[in-house]
Image (tube, rainbow, N blue to C red):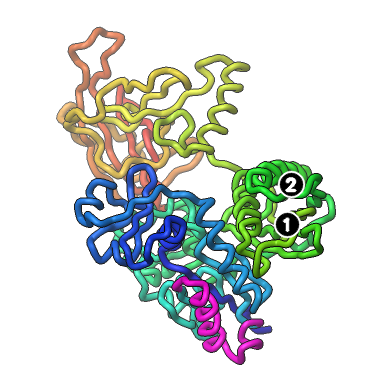
Amino acid sequence: MGRRRTLALWCPDWPAVAAAADADISPDEPVAVISANRVVTCSATARTAGVRRGMRKRESQARCPALHVVTADPGRDGRLFEPLVGAVAEVIPIVEVLRPGLMLLPAAGAARYFGGEEVAAEKLIDVVSACGAESFTGVADELFTAVVAARHGQIVPTGGDVDFLAPLSIAELGAEPSLCGDDREHLIDLLWRLGVRTMGAFAALSVTDVATRFGADAVVAHRATRAEAGRSASGRPPGADVVIDHECDPPIDRVDAAAFVGRRLADELHRALMAASVACTRLTVHASTTGGQHSSRTWRCAEPLTPEATADRIRWQLDGWLSGKDFGNRPDSPISRLRLEPVELVDSGALQFGFRGAGIPGGDGEVADRARRALVRVQGLLGGESVRVPVRSGGRGVAERITLIPLGDELTPASDPDAPWPGRIPEPAPSVVLSAPVTVRDCNDDPVQVTRRGMFSAEPTTVTWGSRSWDLLWWAGPWPADERWWAAPGERVGTHARAQVLLNDSRALLLRYQQQGWTVEGVYE
């Protein structure tokens, strides 16, 4: 069975192009789209003048005094992209919109219609060009590879995804925001500092190492670089109970009314999805007018759609229709019927939010708000001390460098983390912090202690933790310390020592010796 090829059509710098068109600015003028006082997108002319994404507004204007600065508006981007999608849909009916500025089509259908993938790509570029926009196309086996190929304007041979991606920079993993998670930039930065500079080098890492060391988003990125089969549709078709069919009474002929109805239908759809224990990753929005005209648009997302994301896509689409830039011309009558049809479903677990950012400044907005509300309810049931959040603190040991503060209290660390801490445990920190008693023995099975001179009483050879024992492959230390000797008796830390040991199962432990006994203070995994 042949591979299902994908054609991606990408309009570069679309937010800047849409902003220029909306403000009636010439495409040759330098334009920058600003959000939170930083450039999120800029036109090619602006880049030539030295403007870059992430640059502050004042610096960008200093580099390019003629720069037109426009505030980011996703609604404007979606509304103005709709005519391009409609024009492409007139030629190839099956179109999926990843985001305004990027659409996907099945390459097989386009190739059959035009007589080959290369001819189809050129024809679609001509269609978009007739709408006044620049575009690039890419064809590949997998969706991610097709999007990357579109940014390079290439057609990847069948079965050649891995070879095409291998020499490309690891930064390409974050080039398309609709296909990556919030942590992708941190992942790329970490891989670069580790010496993993190309997607081929990342693909060469084992799946186990990536999953255990980098996190869930890294696994998705790793699968993409290996050109493994992407997300597939649910084995069962969406049932009638998760399809929302709405008769508009009165019919919709205004953008504000469309936005209101879209929000209500999005909430209704997601209640039905939750009741069915599924989440939607691909949604088709159908619309019909009182005059009998029909149109539909399919939206695909890398992550399961939330009610807010669904409402945004409905509003963008209806805005484009009602402004007369779809159906080939302005609809001859108001929209009388809307139908939301989930095309692709995944298990509801895919919509599970993480807890990153809860109670911590700079945490993710929606995720942090949801998590915080849930944790406040837990506090109400179990007391204020039942929920505590970590704050980076100062200290020499790993446990001392974290202060747990009750949720809602001022996040003040017990010690200044930026103060000098001579003798502190060097980075990287252990991945697990605990305090569990262990026994360290030498080759004669005698307990190993730390002498007054700060040396091992004998060379350690085994560590016994509970009922299990491990041979030692390597050890470092001990490093003695006498902390807070001046404090009151109840506040003194006292004389102790730390050592690092490597077990024969490749795990490393951070051990602490105090009062003639050993404990595991941290585990490196």
| Nearest the eye: 401 or 423 | 401
Is residue 491 found left or right of 385 in the rendered image?
A: left
- Numbered badge on residue 269: 2
Residue 286 location in percent, x, y? 74, 59
Residue positioned most to the front: 332
Q: Residue at x 79, y 61 (%)?
A: 236
Secondary structure state at the residue bearing disc 1:
strand
Q: How many marks?
A: 2
* Residue bearing the label numbered 1: 342
Provide the major secondary structure of the magenta segment.
helix
Is residue 344 found left or right of 230 in the rendered image?
A: right
Residue 233 location in percent, x, y? 69, 64
Q: Residues within 10 Å of mark 1 (few under 14, many from 20)?
A: many
Q: Residue at x 36, y 75 (%)?
A: 167
Looking at numbered disc 1 in the image, what kind of residue is underneath it? Pro
Secondary structure state at the residue bearing disc 2:
helix
Specify the quadrant of the image occupied by residue 326.
bottom right
Any magenta on residue 132?
yes
Range drawn in magenta: 109-134
Which quadrant of the rendered structure holds the N terminus?
bottom right
Kindly check if marks 2 and 1 are in contact, taking CB atoms under 8 A apart as contact. yes
Q: Is residue 133 above or below residue 217?
A: below
Residue positioned most to the right: 240
Cα separation, mark 2 vs mark 1, equals 9 Å
Any magenta on residue 333?
no
Is residue 490 found left or right of 389 in the rendered image?
A: left
Residue positioned most to the bottom: 115
Question: Can residue 471 be seen here?
Answer: no
Q: Residue at x 62, y 80 (%)?
A: 3
| Nearest the eye: 399 or 83 | 83
